Amino acid sequence: MYKKIIVFEGIDGSGKTFHLNEVAKYLSKKKIKFIKIREPGGTKNSEVIRNIILNKKSTFKKKTDLLLYLAARNENYENLIKPYLNRKVILIDRFIDSTIAYQHYGFKINKRVIKELNNFILGNLKPNFTFFHYVPIKRIKKNISGKKNKYDSFSKNFYNKVQNGFLNILKKNKNKLLIDSSKNKKYNIELIKNRINKILNING
């Protein structure tokens, strides 16, 4: 009944992490078992990889970054996702779509290569639902918070390409909801909560 993979996607500063945490609080209140994962990051090993990738002084090439992202994903899949797949709701902050949006649409790495590597790690695994947080162009890079990393130095144009990539990826995905990040937070919290109720058959 409750065994779903729910992903929160969007560019930096879109509010995706905030809303994932709000959903986590809501599921806790409803006594529904869940785990939450961030990418890159998650397991101890994945967090080590995250620190390497996002270090402001990192000079890794874009293909190196891709392979590191996928190495972190494999650690999460083997140690968190696979063991809990049929036992708990899995909330993920960034997943497959982020890799394609950033690495292909942003950095122009071959999409087929990215998809083949994802399939190598995940097989046929796909999220059950995606919340995509859209940022109006004039607000891009306005709401980035937390510890600064190397991605914060990228241009508004880069993030616009990435966001358009997300929109292109999700165009044919019926199991999604677009969240306008310029809307009131309370409004979006309710919007997401209502959809979570439907996805997990929760009586609100």
Image (tube, rainbow, N blue to C red):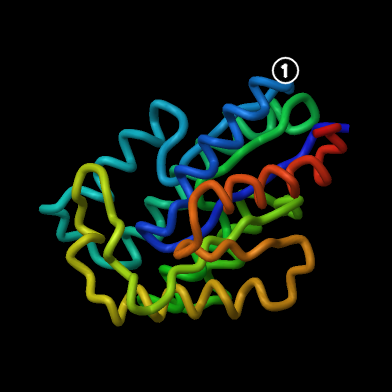
Q: Quadrant of residue 45?
A: top left
Image coords of residue 117 (percent x, y): 56, 60
Quarter of the N terminus within the rendering: top right
Q: Quadrant of residue 34?
A: top right
Image coords of residue 182 (percent x, y): 45, 65
Q: How many marks?
A: 1
Mark 1 = which residue? 31
Is 140 left, or right, of 36 in this rendering? left
Point 41% across, 38% down: residue: 41
Tell me the SS state at disc 1.
loop
Give 146 or 59, whichever is nearer the viewer: 146
Is 64 left, or right, of 179 in this rendering? left
Kind of residue indicated by mark 1: Lys
Is 128 left, or right, of 65 in this rendering? right
Q: Quadrant of residue 153?
A: bottom left
Q: Is residue 154 visible?
A: yes
Query: Is the residue marked by circle 1 packed among few (<14), some (14-19), or many (20+) residues within 10 Å?
Result: few
24 w.r.t. 158: above or below = above
Q: Residue placed farthest to the left in the image? A: 57
Image coords of residue 27 (percent x, y): 67, 27
Q: Residue placed farthest to the top in the image? A: 31
Image coords of residue 9 (percent x, y): 53, 57
Is 139 left, or right, of 183 in this rendering? left
Give 78 or 27, whichever is nearer the viewer: 27
Point 42% across, 68% down: residue: 102
27 w.r.t. 188: above or below = above
59 w.r.t. 146: above or below = below
Point 80% across, 34% down: residue: 204
Point 50% across, 67% down: residue: 134
Q: Is residue 98 visible?
A: no
